[in-house]
Image: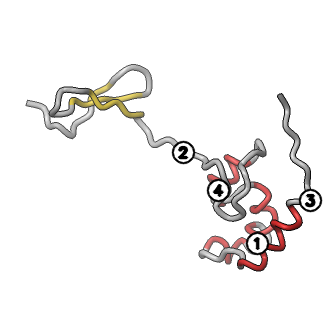
């Protein structure tokens, strides 16, 4: 008898296992990297095409990476993050930038 926690190959890049209640649990073979909708640093929407790559590397949107992570790379990698005052200043400046929405 197969162990309940053991996954078997499924279609494409997925695997599955049977649940004791009779349904199948289907999951990807590998962990999927998920980019959040909002930057965890500035709380702005992740809308730049470079944001997913920036988040994977810096855990911040591309703009925060440019302003905060790159200049203080060593400190950033050891856990430093901008202060509330720095973030408030950045947010007030960013509010002046218009949003462009294409339909």
Residue 43 position within the rendered picture, expressed as x and y whole percent measured from the top left? 69, 60
Which residue appears at 75% of the width and 74% of the height?
A: 72
- N-terminal of the pair, mark 3 or mark 1, is 1
Asked whether 79 or 21 is in front, the reply is 21
> Which disc number belongs to residue 65?
none
Q: Nearer the viewer, mark 2 or mark 1?
A: 1
- Neighbor class of circle 2 (other Cα within 10 Å; few <14, some 14-19, many 20+) is few
Which residue appears at 72% of the width and 55% of the height?
A: 61
> Which disc number belongs to residue 87?
1
Q: CA distance from mark 2 to mark 1?
A: 26 Å
Q: CA distance from mark 1 to mark 4?
A: 20 Å
- N-terminal of the pair, mark 3 or mark 4, is 4
Q: Which residue is mark 2?
A: 33
> Which disc number belongs to residue 57?
4
Q: CA distance from mark 3 to mark 4?
A: 27 Å
Q: Quadrant of residue 66?
A: bottom right
Q: CA distance from mark 3 to mark 2?
A: 32 Å
Q: Nearer the viewer, mark 1 or mark 4?
A: 1
Which of the image's four quarters has the C terminus? top right
Which of the image's four quarters has the N terminus? top left
Residue 83 position within the rendered picture, expressed as x and y whole percent measured from the top left? 71, 79
- Neighbor class of circle 3 (other Cα within 10 Å; few <14, some 14-19, many 20+) is few
Q: How was this image coloured?
A: secondary structure
User: Would residue 37 appear left or right of 97 to someone viewing this image?
Assistant: left
- Neighbor class of circle 1 (other Cα within 10 Å; few <14, some 14-19, many 20+) is some
- N-terminal of the pair, mark 4 or mark 2, is 2
Question: Looking at the image, do the residues carrying marks 4 and 2 touch, with CB atoms under 8 Å apart?
Answer: no
Q: Which residue is mark 3?
A: 96
């Amino acid at each position: 008898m197969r162990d309940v926690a053991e996954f078997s190959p499924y279609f494409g890049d997925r695997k599955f296992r049977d649940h004791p209640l009779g349904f199948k649990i289907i999951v990807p073979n590998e962990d999927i990297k998920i980019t959040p909708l909002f930057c965890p640093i500035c709380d702005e929407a992740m809308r730049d095409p470079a944001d997913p790559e920036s988040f994977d590397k810096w855990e911040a949107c591309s703009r925060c990476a440019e302003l905060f992570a790159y200049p203080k790379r060593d400190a950033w990698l050891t856990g430093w993050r901008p202060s509330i005052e720095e973030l408030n200043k950045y947010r007030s400046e960013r509010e002046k930038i218009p949003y462009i929405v294409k339909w």
